[in-house]
Image (cartoon, rainbow, N blue to C red):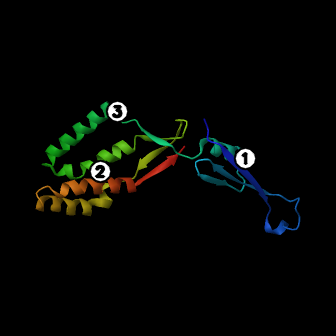
Amino acid sequence: MAPPVSITAVETSPISNLGNPAAIDTLSASVTVAAGKHHHVGGQDSMNQVLQAAQTGSRAARLRCEFSIGQSIGHVIVWVVLTLITFGLALLVFPYYLNRAVLNRTEVLDQQGRPIGKLRCNFDLISSIGHVIIWGILILITFGIAGFFYLYRVVRVVLSDTVIEYY
């Protein structure tokens, strides 16, 4: 059930036509949803967009991840091999790519459960290599204790490099 809405439409005209009330070029509309969310649609947007915004109440309601067991197994195999080849150094960047893989397979759903977008993580190792090296040294110096704090930093960095791409 859609939340109750109130729709207010305000007609506006360009400054050159202010003296002529019959010259209406654009339509602006405000939509207020009972939950307190406010949407504004203006310019050449149609009233259908206003009504759609009113029905959904907001653009995004929840997330759905499609990261399967098969993808997990493939991901783990690659990272075990990389860990063996690099004598464990790959484990410093593993948390970044683990979070990135999960985020890149996550959809954004509207309140009715329809997909309206997806998450795209733009993280790349090149932009964070200095931080990875510093945290690696801190983890060695603290005999692994800094690793607990490093994991929180990894999540922050990956989420900061993530955007929603609406369909």
Q: Position of residue 39 (x, y in %)?
A: 63, 53
Q: Residue at x 32, y 53 (%)?
A: 155
Q: Residue at x 61, y 38 (%)?
A: 2
Q: Which mark is residue 68?
A: 3
Give SS at disc 3.
loop
Give SS at disc 2.
helix
Q: Which residue is mark 2?
A: 96
Q: CA distance from mark 3 to mark 2?
A: 18 Å
Horizontal side, residue 89 vs residue 54: left or right: left
Whether 160 is drawn above or below 4: the answer is below
Give SS at disc 1.
helix
- Tell which of 72 and 139 is nearer to you: 139
Q: Which mark is residue 131?
A: none
For the residues labelled 3 and 2, say whether their Cβ atoms are less than 8 Å apart. no
Mark 3 vs mark 1, foreground winner is 1
Q: Residue at x 16, y 62 (%)?
A: 137
| Three-letter residue code for mark 2 | Tyr
User: Where does the C terminus fall, quadrant-wise?
Assistant: top right
Crowding near pointer 1: few (<14 within 10 Å), some, many (20+)? some
| Three-letter residue code for mark 1 | Met
Q: Position of residue 139 (x, y in %)?
A: 16, 58
